[in-house]
Amino acid sequence: MLQFEKTMARVLLLNAGLTMLVVFGFIGPPQQTNEFIVLLATGLLGVISAVLAMRGRIIGWWGGLIFYGLQLFSYYPYGDGWGYAVKAGVSFSVDFRFSHGVFLVNLIALLFALVTAFLLRHHVKKARAIPAARP
């Protein structure tokens, strides 16, 4: 299990690194100001979470869950209106077309979020199984 956790932490770091490449314009078009701030915060969250997860900290998996959760859904309206998208890392999406816009579900982010939730659950169960040391 430890090797699987290390591998998933490395995958999180790779996805966060791809996000940082998107932020600074090495991959894809330059970002607008609002998108830049959101992607930068998402990328930094991913990097910090990956480092903490590699060190065996449970907070790293919480951060990874938030990192993948931000990328899970996207919405693009057909006309003027509010849209939401955090396009970072690797994406393979299923789209749902409605009369007012397109709703996307990122399947890769969904898979990684489920695996991260499993690892988080494993860490919580392991922490509860170890009784706290009494002074």
Image (cartoon, grey):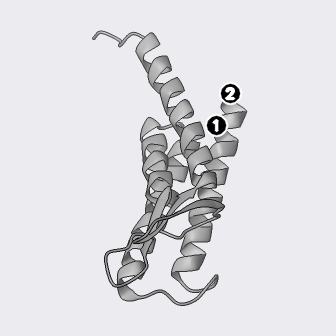
Viewer-proximal residue among 22 and 103: 103
Q: Is residue 133 above or below residue 2?
A: above
Q: Is residue 25 above or below residue 8?
A: below
Taking 73 as reference, is 83 left or right? left
Which residue has dot 2 on it?
Answer: 1
Viewer-proximal residue among 24 and 87: 87
Count of residue discs: 2
Q: Quadrant of the C terminus?
A: top left
Q: Residues within 10 Å of mark 2 (few under 14, many from 20)?
A: few
Q: Is residue 71 above or below residue 129?
A: below
Res. 55 visible in picture: no
Viewer-proximal residue among 118 and 45: 118
Residue 23 pos. (x, y %): 51, 79
Helix or strand or loop: what does disc 1 sit on? Answer: helix
Viewer-proximal residue among 33 and 56: 33
Q: Are marks 1 and 2 in contact (CB under 8 Å)?
A: yes
Q: Residue at x 43, y 42 (%)?
A: 62
Residue 106 pos. (x, y %): 57, 57
Gap in Å between the C-alphas at discs 1 and 2? 6 Å
- Amino acid type at circle 2 is Met
Residue 65 pos. (x, y %): 47, 46
Q: Is residue 14 above or below residue 25?
A: above
Taking 28 as reference, is 32 left or right? left
Q: Residue at x 50, y 53 (%)?
A: 68
The dot on residue 29 is none
Q: Residue at x 63, y 53 (%)?
A: 108
- Amino acid type at circle 1 is Glu
Q: Residues within 10 Å of mark 1 (few under 14, many from 20)?
A: some
Residue lying at the far left in this picture: please name it. Answer: 135
Which residue has dot 1 on it?
Answer: 5
Residue 66 pos. (x, y %): 42, 50
